[in-house]
Amino acid sequence: MADFSTSTHCHHWILQRSTLVDKLFTTNQRAQEALIKYGATRVDVQPDGSLAYPENLEVEAANGKRGPTPEHLTVEDELMIRKFYEQKIQQVCQAFSFPNKIQATAILYFKRFYLNWSVMEHDPKHIMLTCIYLSCKVEEFHVSAEELGKGIQQDPQVVLKNEMTVLQCLNFELIVYAPYRSLDGYIFDLENSVQMMGAVAVKNVQELRESAIFEIDAMMLTDAPLLFPPGQLAMAALRRANRDDKKVDLERYMKGIVDRLATKHTLSELDTAMDAIDVAVGESIHVVEADVRRIDRKLKICRNPGLQDETKKRERKGKQKQKRPLQEGAPPMDPNPMDTTNHGVKRRHSEPEGIF
């Protein structure tokens, strides 16, 4: 793998905070404008790069026959949905026992894609699956679309359908430098430096690695991977993992790296970057299932306005049922609705209905 400093990852995908905010705002605004103009936001990218909205919606809009404009997602709504699916990427990768680099690459593909598109324009569930599939191909960990689809009970054609759209959005710049790889380099260096101190010191470093991996997993769900290089993310993870139970003298190690490698950053600048990463992790939103359900309903209607009428019909039927008195001897409604598996075993919802 080429040096990070000369990579497209470094030159094209490490952004300033203001640039990141502008991109997310712009994509949300474009989707809102499409919603006002066409009454829906789902879009197909044509071979020439132009955008195509459903023809029937364009005709209805031109003839003034369109129904009320659905409620759009806010920038904050989109953030919640994106984080939900980034967590799903981690869960799918863990279920398939994929290496950490697969997970990191897929999440970064997903993040990069939605720098240029709104979740209102392209279904995040489908894009998520395609990002996982592409990351397996790029990292040479072969899993077919059929295997992936079967493993998570999704149509493999959905995975393949969006492949070219994702590749074009990424400008075919597919090499990703994951912080897990940087972490392994630091750990190898630390193990060598404490080798003479005995087995306990080496074990401490190994335990530090496990804690740091957990910290990187959390960082991958924030904006930090789009704002900071992987080496700084990995070092920040080490510092966070070492903060409560100091297993190594990390300050001394960091100073040694700066002096030994003659980096362009001073120790003070490195500390400042890691402080900013800590802030990004601390400010990361918590995914609330009730909020995701609400936002997902809005998202589905934005992409398919016909669902708005169906939703209203269901709501009216629900109200009518509530008004009906219970028949004599009939059991009360279960306040905790459950799913029923093929074997008749009931289980509670573990994730937002209809999302995954």
Image (tube, rainbow, N blue to C red):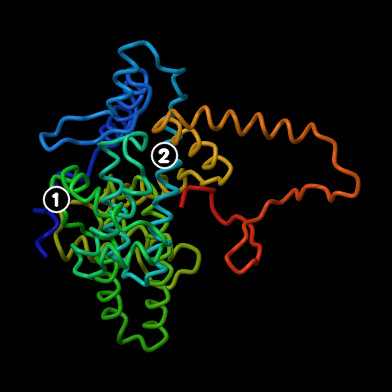
- In this rendering, the count of numbered labels is 2
Q: Assess disc 1: are there few (<14), some (14-19) or many (≥20) residues with their C-alpha within 10 Å of its C-alpha.
A: some
Say the numbered circle drawn on residue 173: 1
- Which of the two residues, 161 or 81, is positioned nearer the viewer here? 161
- Which of the two residues, 54 or 111, is positioned nearer the viewer here? 54
Q: Position of residue 297 (x, y in %)?
A: 50, 36
Q: Quadrant of residue 142?
A: bottom left
Mark 2 and mark 1 lie on one chain; the one further toward the N terminus is 2
Q: Position of residue 339 (x, y in %)?
A: 62, 57
For the point 45% across and 18% down, the residue is 67
- In the image, residue 41 sits, relative to residue 187, either above or below, namely above
- In the image, residue 288 sits, relative to residue 255, either above or below, namely above
For the point 45% across and 31% down, the residue is 301
For the point 44% across and 19% down, the residue is 69
Say the numbered circle drawn on residue 79: 2
Q: Position of residue 66 (x, y in %)?
A: 40, 17
Quarter of the image that includes the N terminus: bottom left
What's the residue type where badge 2 is placed?
Answer: Leu
| Residue at the far top in the pictured view | 64
Numbered disc 1: secondary structure: loop
For the point 38% across and 57% down, the residue is 154
- Which of the two residues, 85 or 356, is positioned nearer the viewer here? 356
Q: Position of residue 210 (x, y in %)?
A: 41, 72
